[in-house]
């Protein structure tokens, strides 16, 4: 698929993760005239929706300058129930704008995609204190991880258990308590790193981000993250590691007009 570098990268890395690890039962559909019409639908777009229907949520991969291809959803073999709400995971804002010809977007959350072409080499630049331990996360750690995850309404706990069994995932523990965590996601990016409030401003975030960025790159991925525009702390952290902003995405509940 040839289109804007980071959009294409997100698509290829989602496929790469699925083929290599298959952490979830995902389905991919392309246009009948593929690849001349380069649009791919990824079902489910998130792992937790009200009715547990795989076609209830979607992520759409499509060149932003070809956003009109979204119209094929209503003219080719129809996979979506156009009378029901559709849960759209982070998708390029131009594609979401095209969806809004058919749907009204509710509960919009924007996120800027930042990627890193040159991952940091030195992951031991800052030593952790003696009472702090870096741990490779395991499924049994997922209750604590999930309790910290801010988007538990769209991703189920089971997906985290599968992710940490297959993909890089680390936690920082202080005297046996989980203080911060970071996990590679099923779409090739890195899930937003979370730190318990009482452990912030101790350097744990950049330590984790540096470690996972390097490991994700060593596995053949181009590291990228989605950062909320108002999250100045995360933006500053990732920019220090060489991440640069690429484009804006939107997550929303689409309701029929």
Image (cartoon, helix red, strand yellow):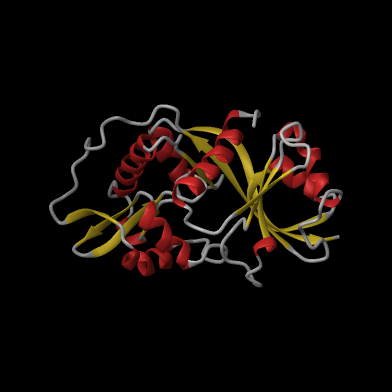
Is residue 63 rendered to the left or right of residue 12? right
Q: Between 131 and 15, which is closer to the camera in this rendering?
A: 15
Is the residue 21 above or below the residue 125 in the image? Answer: below
Outermost residue toward the left? Answer: 130
Residue 231 visible in the current orientation: no
> Which quadrant holds residue 38?
top right
Outermost residue toward the bottom? Answer: 51
Is residue 88 rendered to the left or right of residue 191? right
> Which quadrant holds residue 2?
top right
Q: Position of residue 251 (x, y in %)?
A: 64, 53
Residue at screen point 44% across, 37% down: 223
Residue at screen point 35% across, 55% down: 181
Residue 162 visible in the current orientation: yes
Q: Position of residue 197 (x, y in %)?
A: 36, 60
Residue at screen point 54% across, 33% down: 245
Is the residue 149 above or below the residue 69 in the image? Answer: below
Q: Between 247 and 61, which is closer to the camera in this rendering?
A: 61
Residue at screen point 18% across, 42% down: 127
């Amino acid at each position: 698929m040839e289109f804007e570098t980071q959009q294409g990268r997100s698509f290829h890395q989602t496929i790469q993760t699925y083929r290599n690890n298959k952490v979830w039962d995902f389905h991919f559909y392309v246009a009948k005239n593929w690849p001349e019409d380069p649009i791919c639908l990824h079902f489910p777009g998130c792992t937790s929706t009200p009715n547990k229907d795989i076609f209830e949520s979607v992520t759409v991969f499509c060149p932003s300058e070809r956003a009109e291809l979204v119209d094929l959803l209503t003219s080719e073999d129809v996979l979506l129930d156009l009378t029901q709400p559709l849960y759209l995971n982070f998708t390029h804002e131009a594609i979401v704008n095209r969806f809004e010809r058919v749907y009204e977007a509710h509960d919009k959350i924007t996120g800027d995609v930042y990627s890193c072409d040159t991952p940091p080499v030195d992951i031991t630049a800052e030593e952790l204190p003696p009472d702090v331990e870096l741990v490779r996360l395991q499924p049994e750690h997922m209750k604590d991880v999930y309790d910290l995850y801010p988007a538990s309404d769209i991703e189920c706990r089971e997906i985290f258990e599968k992710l940490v069994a297959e993909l890089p995932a680390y936690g920082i523990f202080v005297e046996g308590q989980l203080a911060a965590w970071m996990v590679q996601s099923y779409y090739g990016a890195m899930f937003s790193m979370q730190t318990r409030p009482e452990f912030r401003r101790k350097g744990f975030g950049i330590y984790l981000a540096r470690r996972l960025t390097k490991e994700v790159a060593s596995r053949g991925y181009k590291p990228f993250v989605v950062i909320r525009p108002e999250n100045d702390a995360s933006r500053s952290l990732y920019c220090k590691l060489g991440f640069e902003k690429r484009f804006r995405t939107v997550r929303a509940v689409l309701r029929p007009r």
